Amino acid sequence: MSSFIKIHGLQIEYRLIEHEDQSASTKAPTLVFLHEGLGSMKMWKQFPDDICKDNKLRGLVFSRPGYGWSDSDNTPLDKSFMHHQAKNILPTLLTILGIKVPLLIGHSDGASIALIAASQKQQRLVGVVAIAPHVIVEEITVSSIKQFEANYYSKNISEKLARYHKDAHSMFSHWVKIWLDPSFRKWSLVDLLSKIEAPLLLIQGEDDVYGTTRQLDIIKNSIKTYVHSSILPKCGHSPQFDQPDLTRKLIKNFISWEISKL
């Protein structure tokens, strides 16, 4: 069931995942899930609960401003929109909820936000799981978003998104506008990557139409800390749904390894 918390004057939709057998250690991290560019708290479906159960850890799932049933903020959408989430919204949310030791699990835009957050070193991050992250804008990404926009009405995508967002059309329009803005082609996280000290797990599907494995190569070549990456077969842009068992196994192994060092 959703709860709401006020951040910067906005009501933010969130859910805490608790388990009776979760670790009682004060060093145990809280798994924080950051959804994709058209996602929301509920669009993760059962995945966060499964990951928390696999690792006997508590979790936090939430909808960013303008997504799900969270209030929209009036922050101008420009090339820094993901930086705003990583530097302002996420740290405030974690502070208010008393989450001092997070492990970030992000998908697509959410994975990029997680990487930006890790570069800021504002929290004591145990690690980052980046699923299909973007660190540069590729032509395949732009082309696929153009195709998705063309299908928005013809294939009832608008109706499907309306199940998960109180203002799906506004959310979709804003997201498409920024990604297809010609000035956004120069957007890049490359300069931030060398600042990341937290260990990383990178996951991408080999059939991802929103990004190539170049994204992972750039990250691996820029990071000095531990990085493990996996390209999953028969998998598109959403490994958590296309290859759920393998994705869960990779995340469990990564978390178990990092927790053993705490």
Image (cartoon, rainbow, N blue to C red):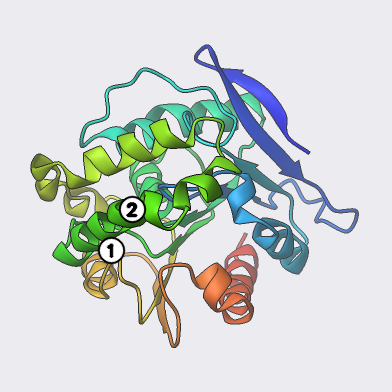
Q: Secondary structure at mark 2?
A: loop
Residue 123 image offset from top left, x and y in percent: 49, 39
Image quadrant where residue 262 sits: bottom right
At 26% from the left and 60% from the top, the residue drawn is: 147
Height in image: 111 above or below 237?
A: above
Q: Residues within 10 Å of mark 2 (few under 14, many from 20)?
A: many
Q: Secondary structure at mark 1?
A: loop
**For this rendering, which residue is in front, 84 or 177?**
177
At 30% from the left and 65% from the top, the residue drawn is: 210
**For this rendering, which residue is in front, 56 or 83?**
83
Looking at the image, residue 95 sits to the left or right of residue 54; the answer is left
Residue 78 image offset from top left, x and y in percent: 22, 32
Q: Which residue is mark 2?
A: 196
At 59% from the left and 26% from the top, the residue drawn is: 12
Residue lying furthest bottom: 233
* Total numbered labels placed on residues in the image: 2
Residue lying furthest top: 9
Amino acid at circle 2: Ile
Residue 81 image offset from top left, x and y in percent: 30, 34
Looking at the image, residue 163 sits to the left or right of residue 111; the answer is right
Asked if the residues shown at circle 1 and circle 2 are in contact, with their CB atoms under 8 angstroms apart, the answer is yes
Q: Residues within 10 Å of mark 1 (few under 14, many from 20)?
A: some
Residue 249 image offset from top left, x and y in percent: 62, 78
**For this rendering, which residue is in front, 225 or 189?**
189
At 29% from the left and 70% from the top, the residue drawn is: 216
Q: Which residue is mark 1?
A: 223
